[in-house]
Image (cartoon, coloured by chain):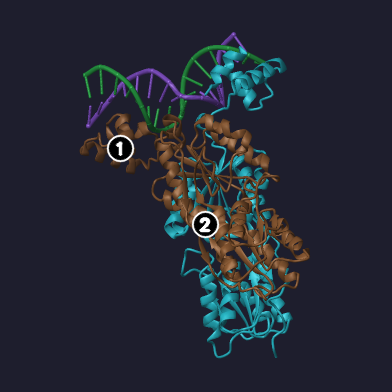
Chain colours: A cyan, B brown, C green, D purple
Amino acid sequence: MPTIEDVAREARVGVGTVSRVINGSPLVSEARRKRVLAAIELLGYRPSQVARAFGSRRTRALEVIVPLFLGPIFLHVLQGIQDALAENGHTLLLRTVDTREERDRAFKECCSRGRADGALALWLVPSPTLVDRVLAERFPVVLLNVADPRFWSVGVDHDVSAQHAVEYCAGLGHRRIALIDRREDVFDPDGAGMCERGYREAVHSAGLEDRAEYEQKAEFSKAGGAAALERLAELPEPPTAIVVASEAQAIGVLQAAREHGWRIPGDVSVVGYSDSAYAEYLGLTTIGVPVREIGREATRVLLGAIADPAPAPRAIMRQTNLLVRRTCGPPRN
Amino acid sequence: MPTIEDVAREARVGVGTVSRVINGSPLVSEARRKRVLAAIELLGYRPSQVARAFGSRRTRALEVIVPLFLGPIFLHVLQGIQDALAENGHTLLLRTVDTREERDRAFKECCSRGRADGALALWLVPSPTLVDRVLAERFPVVLLNVADPRFWSVGVDHDVSAQHAVEYCAGLGHRRIALIDRREDVFDPDGAGMCERGYREAVHSAGLEDRAEYEQKAEFSKAGGAAALERLAELPEPPTAIVVASEAQAIGVLQAAREHGWRIPGDVSVVGYSDSAYAEYLGLTTIGVPVREIGREATRVLLGAIADPAPAPRAIMRQTNLLVRRTCGPPRN
DNA sequence: TTGTAGGCGTTATCAG
DNA sequence: CTGATAACGCCTACAA
């Protein structure tokens, strides 16, 4: 492997000049630049990324912290990230987290180990106990689809989304509308529901009865959605419409409802949350979340924060839009 | 950020000793090890990963090269990779490739830029023109689910899989069995079909008529599968069973068949390839590929090849197993 | 605009 | 077992 010195010798210039050429500095005469480029070509020189990172104290890498249960959504976010990264030569580090402990380690290590210049946390916040620590490291972190005023974030307003979904069902004539929610912090089993506030508001303003048993919190998974549906189905007065806080849960709901002998949307209407090829195939009426765009925008924000850490963090909000398909209809009576 | 020197000073030892402690060398007395550990704790020292990589010429990172169209399969592979990586402290670099050019760049750069110690190529081979170059770099690469005798690989035998699928359909009584195949090299639109050999063999040995029009090659996507189904549906004598070379294509086939007015499995039976939660939900009868296990095994192989590059590469094969669900039945007559 | 030299935080070597 | 010390390959002042 040739080094920068070999190139400098071959081109009969100093290593500084080679470095400048590599980094696109304008402070190089055209003649020398050509000589350097030729030498690079001749020797097949490729700068060592590790040495560059070491020398410049910038890794040109971004860490993506992702809970695997996101499923295909992750792939869409990834596309957005790539959109923003196209041609700017950043590397992606992938860190998957499936438990609370892994999440904590991920946040701790991304700050201190210096493998990346910043991090994107997908559908994830740092544990409350870690927030101060992460903040203290002044390591740029952008949260996707969750909000915390102390961090940069890009996402949608989940309460507004739930509100829209409830309003849509109410508009179809439903009076018994349930919510299968997820936790705001997936890894906090006792935490608040992500959509509960918006759901309650919509229930109130639609003049519907406010029944606690219609507010189910479930695990962020197919199984979680299915289990919640069972609970709703056992109620003396089951709901006629269900708003579900994620696609994974919604699929579980559809499956469980079918096994329960319910027809959809005949016996029960279902509104999902976020979209994918599968939701489309299943005909799931759902609240579309511009996931790819969120990934793209968040990456831009992160790159910006890395380049200039001065600005105070903001929460950037995107619109959702209801995708009407085949799982909603008017109530039976 | 404290450095190794700060720790050495605090612990009143040399930097070499600190380094040994960090790296778990046995050549340290218990007394000093304790002093060092205490100093590390006291100072909150974290070794710089970049400096370590620079000093040791080992990044402790693996690059994952993945075509995004893999969809959820990628997530399963990822879990397998994480299984193998648990607790051994390697980092994952993610490189997505969606075109032939991106694929080529990925293979070129992973070798020369030195960001990772090895690479896992998912469902991907290097372009024929790049093979020699990659080989020459002596950069460890393991191919997943594709085979090339010049590289390490872990996967399944696609011909055997196709054969099983055809045999299964023939066993149900089908005589007109079609194949919707994908290219062996996804990015080579003129390349050979991945399953064609096994399909033909099975057709012959089942004593079925060998019809060229039953052998469709399609893009590795839902749309590709759907388009191929249209072509088969237009045939004067359409098949009564279809073997499809991927899950994505199979889903397109199901959708297109439904739109075509075909009932499944009444009018046509479908066998998919590889499995996911969605295939399960859809009731797709499919050839299960142990994707997670392939990811795990490939990672182990890669780590082995990094540790000891001497052994000649081998192709490691795993078994598939037919998952019988609801998309296959006997032919109508 | 250019070259030189110091520094980045480890690892690895080599005497002790 | 231990501690100096020389790499490692690049970036970035700084002086010219």
Vertical side of A143 occupied by B1: above or below: above
Q: Position of residue B129 (x, y in %)?
A: 63, 33
Three-letter code, disc 1: Val
Report the number of discs: 2
Residue at the image position 59 percent from the left and 55 percent from the top: B201
Q: Residue at x 62, y 74 (%)?
A: B330
**Above or below for B22 versus A77:** above
Q: Quadrant of the C terminus of chain B?
A: bottom right
| Res A322 label | none
Residue toward you, B74 or B164: B164
Residue count near mark 1 (Cα–Cα under 10 Å), binned few <14, some 14–19, many ≥20: some
Distance in Å between CA atoms under marks 1 and 2: 36 Å
- Counting from the top left corner in percent of width and height, residue B184 is at 62, 48
Considering only order in the chain, which callout, 2 or 1, is on the residue closer to the N terminus?
1
Location of residue B212 in the rendering, given as x and y in whole percent from the top left corner: 71, 55
Residue at (59, 45) in percent of width and height: B124
Q: Is residue A294 visible?
A: yes
Q: Nearer the viewer, residue A153 or A92?
A: A92
Callout 1: SS: helix
* Amino acid at dot 2: His
Q: Which mark is residue B76?
A: 2
Q: Are marks 1 and 2 in contact (CB under 8 Å)?
A: no
- Disc 2: CA contacts within 10 A as few (<14), some (14-19) or many (>=20): many
Left or right: where does residue A281 sit relative to residue B118?
A: right
Residue underneath mark 1: B21
